[in-house]
Image (tube, rainbow, N blue to C red):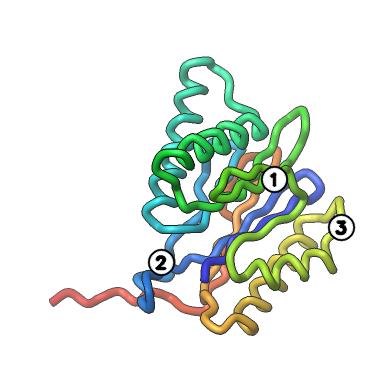
Amino acid sequence: MECVFGLVGNGFAIVAADTSAVHSILVHKSNEDKIMVLDSHKLVAASGESGDRVQFTEYIQKNVALYQFRNGIPLTTAAAANFTRGELATALRKNPYFVNILLAGYDKETGPSLYYIDYIATLHKVDKGAFGYGSYFCLSLMDRHYHSGMTVDEAIALVDKCIMEIRSRLVVAPPNFVIKIVDKDGAREYAWRESVKDTAVPAA
């Protein structure tokens, strides 16, 4: 029941993901951050098997950092997306990762961009995208309300529409979402949308 979606606006890209860690019929936690800051100007939002998701996104993050350390310049968003796609394609023939990725970034030359990469190593540059059961609602809402050159306020309003639709229409809807944004000032957390908070277990 995972939901990951994102869009590109005027000078920024925004991604949102549910924060539920679920296995079978159990919810283990509801504050799992599924959007990794890849570097100063890139975000990776991932869905899929939790072990694959964490291992693969950390692997990509460390290799992107290694490239910058060795060469003194960061990978562009397009280069990072193609590297990620290449690693997924290589693993597909050996020990595949079941992970779907939305990679958002900002480059000085080309501005914001969003890349759709699925578990069978399909890569597309998109203006809006979504994964998971929530995509049934998010994609239709974004088809209706998305337009190029959206402001941050317009984009957040659309993200909130998607979250409300998921919560009201999906049978087993995740209660909490995290929203992150990347623009010329860097990649950062924007907001949380929480309807359930994890309670601390009192010490014995």
**Where does label 3 land, which residue?**
147
**Where does label 1 land, which residue?**
114
Q: Residue 26 appears in which quarter of the rendering?
A: bottom left
Residue 10 appears in the picture as rendered: yes
Q: Is residue 154 left or right of residue 84?
A: right
Query: Helix, strand or loop at disc 2?
Result: strand
Type of the residue with mark 1: Leu
Rendered location of residue 6, percent (x, y) = 67, 56
Query: Helix, strand or loop at disc 1?
Result: strand
Mark 2 Cα shell of 10 Å, populated few (<14), some (14-19), many (≥20): some
Task: In the rendered structure, find residue 21 and report the number of the disc placed on it.
Answer: 2
- Look at the image and tell me in which quarter the C terminus lies: bottom left
Task: In the rendered structure, find residue 32 and report the number of the disc placed on it.
Answer: none
Q: Residue at left 40%, top 57%?
A: 50
Given residues 190 and 119, the one toward you in this image is: 119
* Mark before the other along the chain sequence, 3 or 2: 2
Where 7 sits versus 138, above or below? Answer: above
Distance in Å between CA atoms under marks 1 and 2 = 25 Å
Query: Helix, strand or loop at disc 3?
Result: loop
Rendered location of residue 121, percent (x, y) = 58, 43
Residue 45 appears in the picture as rendered: no
Mark 3 Cα shell of 10 Å, populated few (<14), some (14-19), many (≥20): some
Where 28 sits versus 112, above or below? Answer: below
